[in-house]
Amino acid sequence: MLETLITVMLSCGVLIAVVLIKPNITIKGKQFSIYWLAPLIGAIVIICLGLLSPKEVLSGLTASGEVNPIKILVLFISMTIISVFLDNAGFFRYLAGRVLARSKSGQRGLFNALYLMVSLLTVFTSNDIIILTFTPFICYFTLSADLDPIPYLIAEFIAANTWSMALIIGNPTNIYLASSAGIDFFLYISKMLLPTVLAGVVSFCLLRLIFRKQLAKPIAHTTSNARFEDKGAVIIGLVHLIGCIVFLSIASYLSLPMWKIALGFCISLIIVSSIYLLFSGNGFHLLRDTVKRAPFDIIPFVLAMFVLVLALDKYGTTASLSVFLDTGNNMNALTFGISSFLTANIINNIPMSVLFSSIIGYLPDGGRAAALYASIIGSNLGAFFTPLGALAGIMWMDLLKHHHVKLTFLQFIKYGALISLAALGAALIGLAIVL
C-alpha cells in the first residue's frame, strides 16, 4: 500500500509541476505536450513492481460502464474530430463574421446571450461537446471584432461546466456516479436542479463583475469577408455535428451508449467527406489537417491516471478514505463536495469519479446520498478551478493555443478560483436544502 501511495503522489506532484513549468517541448519547430509523461511513468512503475498485474489493468480499463476510459476517449476524440473538421472547413470563421455583422446590442448583450445560449445547450447535450463547438466560434468572433476573447471564453467554459450538472446526460461523470448508485433520470433532477441554478446565478454575477470593464468597451462593427473554405465540406460536417448532438441528447432515452453514437458519426464523417473530396478534386488536406489536430496525447494521460486509481482501490486506500471523509448523514455533502472538487484537480475528474464511486460504496447507507450528489457537484465545478480539473479543460487550453489565444495555467486559476469556490458554496447550499 505504501509503495502505491508514494508512486501515485509522486506522479501527481510531477504532473502538476510539469503543467506549471513546462507543459510542452519544441522539437524541430513543432510543439509536443509532455504533461502525460508523469502519470504514464507512474503507471509503468506500478505494473513493473507487480502492484498491478497486466491482467488486472486490462480488466479495469475495459470494465463495463459509461466512464470506462476507452469509451470516454472514443467519445472525446470523435467529437473533437467533427468539430475540428468544421473549423478547418471555415464554418466557425464564417459564423463569427455573420454574427459580428448583426451585433448591435454592445458587448454586454452579446456576453449575456452567449452565457445563456451555452447554458441552455449544455443542459440538453454535454459540457464537452459545447466547449469543443463554441470555442473556435468565439476565437474567430472576437478576432474579427478586435475584442478581448478572454471574457467570452471564460464565460463559455464556466457556463458549460456549471449547467452540465442539471441533467444526468450533461457530463460523463454524472452518468457514472449516478448510475453506480442506481439514481434514475427524474430522481437526479429533483436533487440537482436547485444546486445547478444557484451555482449558475452566482457564476454569472461574478463573471459580469470581473469583466465589467472589458464589456463596457464598444464593438468595432466591421464588415466581414469571411467565406467558407469549402462549402460542401461545411455542409457535410454540419449535418454530422447536428445529427451527433441530437442523438447524444436523447441517448439515455434510447439506451444508446454515447461513445458509440460519437464514433459512428465520426466514422461516417470520414467516409462521406473522403468520397466528396475525392470527386471534388480538392485533395485530402482538409481531412489530413483535421486528424493532425486531434488530441491524441490525451490517450496516455487518461489510461495512466486510471491505472493509478485502480492501484489505490486494490490496496485499500479507498476504504481508508471512506472512513476519513465520512462525517455522517447529510454533513457528507460538505466533506465530499470539497474533497471531490480538489481531487479532480489533482487526478482529473474522470479518474476522480471512479475513485469516489468506490469510496462512496464503503459508506453507511445514511450518508451515501449526500456524498454522491456532492461528488457530482465537485466533478463538474472542479473543471474551472484549474485546467487539470477536467479532460475538456486540457483540450480547451490546446484549442486556445491553436487559435493563438494566450491564457496561462496561472491566469486560468486567477479567473477560475474565485468563481469556482463561490459556485461550489452555492451548489452545496442548494444540495443541503433539497436533502
Image (cartoon, rainbow, N blue to C red):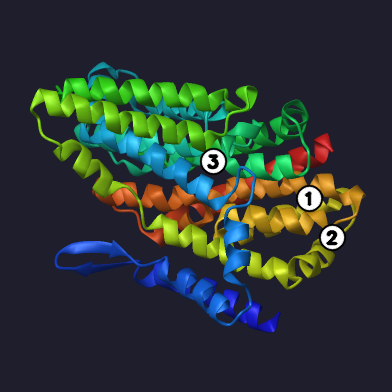
Amino acid type indicated by mark 3: Asn
* Left or right of 31, for residue 424: right
Going from N to C along the chain, the mark reached first, 3 or 2, is 3
Pointer 3 residue: 161
Figure check: 149 above or below 281 = below
| CB atoms of marks 2 and 1 within 8 Å | yes
Residue under the image location 90 percent in, 55 percent down: 328
Residue under the image location 49 percent in, 69 percent down: 39
Quarter placement of the C terminus = top right
Instruction: Using the numbered discs, state the Cα–Cα distance from disc 3 to disc 1 in whole angstroms.
Output: 20 Å
In the foreground, 308 or 20: 308
Pointer 2 residue: 326
* Left or right of 377, for residue 364: right
Q: Secondary structure at mark 1?
A: helix
Q: Secondary structure at mark 3?
A: helix
| CB atoms of marks 3 and 2 within 8 Å | no
Instruction: Using the numbered discs, state the Cα–Cα distance from disc 2 to disc 1 in whole angstroms.
Output: 9 Å
Amino acid type indicated by mark 1: Ala
Asked whether residue 216 appears in the rendered view, the answer is no
Q: Position of residue 350 (x, y in %)?
A: 58, 52
| CB atoms of marks 3 and 1 within 8 Å | no
Going from N to C along the chain, the mark reached first, 2 or 1, is 2
Q: Position of residue 299 (x, y in %)?
A: 43, 56
* Left or right of 124, for residue 394: left
Q: Position of residue 244 (x, y in %)?
A: 44, 26
Residue placed furthest toward the left: 281
Residue 111 occupies quadrant: top left
Asked whether residue 12 appears in the rendered view, the answer is yes
Q: Residues within 10 Å of mark 2 (few under 14, many from 20)?
A: many
Pointer 1 residue: 371
